[in-house]
Image (spheres, rainbow, N blue to C red):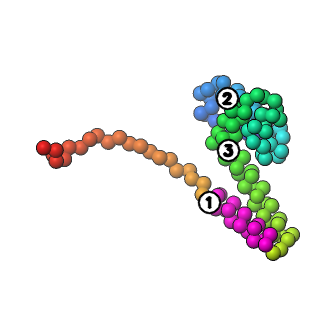
Amino acid sequence: MGALLDIVNKDEGLKKDKEILALFRSYATLFDGELRENLMLTSLDLDDKYNTNDSVGWRKFVNYAPIRKFIEDLLLERADKNAKLSMTVIGGQDVKDALHVQKMVEERRKGEDNSHIVVMFLPKRDFGLDD
C-alpha cells in the first residue's frame, strides 16, 4: 500500500463521505504509482495524464490538508537535498542561492503550526450600565 493511500484510508474525515473517499482512494493509488513524477504535476496535468476528466477532483485531492502536507514535505525534502548538493559541487553566487533555499526550507519546517482555535460563547453579563 502506498503512503497516500494509507493517509486516505486512515483519515476519519473522509470516512463520512463515501463518494469522496472512493475518489481519493483511486487518485491516491494513481499518484502513489508514479510518486516521483507526480510530485511536480498540477491538478490539470494529473487530469490529462490519467485522462480522468476531473481536474476539480484532482485539485480537491492535492489540496486536502493531510495530502498537501505529505506532498509539501517531500518537495521540501527534495529542495533541501538539492541545496546541500549544490553547496558541495559549486561555488560563488550559486552557493548563496543554495543557502537561501536551505534557510527557506528550515523556516517552513519550523513554521508548522499544530495549534487549534477554540471558540467559546459565554453568557451575556449584565454590569448594570444600561439605564
Residue at image coords 72%, 33%: 55
Magenta: main secondary structure equals helix
Look at the image and tell me whether residue 56 can be seen.
yes
Vertical placement of residue 113 versus 23, above or below: below
Badge 2 or badge 3: first in the primary sequence: 2
Vertical placement of residue 82 versus 127, above or below: below
- Residue 89 inside the magenta-drawn segment: no
Magenta-drawn segment: 93-110
Pair 3/1: label in front: 3
For the residue pair 80 and 101, the one nearer the viewer reads as 101
At label 2, counting other C-alpha atoms closer than 10 Å, the crowd grade (few under 14, some 14-19, many 20 or more) is some
Residue with the mark numbered 3: 68
Give amino acid for label 2: Leu
Q: Furthest residue to the top?
A: 19
Residue with the mark numbered 2: 21
Question: Is 75 left, or right, of 10 in this rendering?
Answer: right
Residue with the mark numbered 1: 110
Residue at image coords 66%, 41%: 63
Name the image quarter holding residue 90: bottom right
Task: From the top left corner, tell me how far across and down residue 84 is, in percent.
Answer: 79, 65
Secondary structure of residue under mark 3: helix
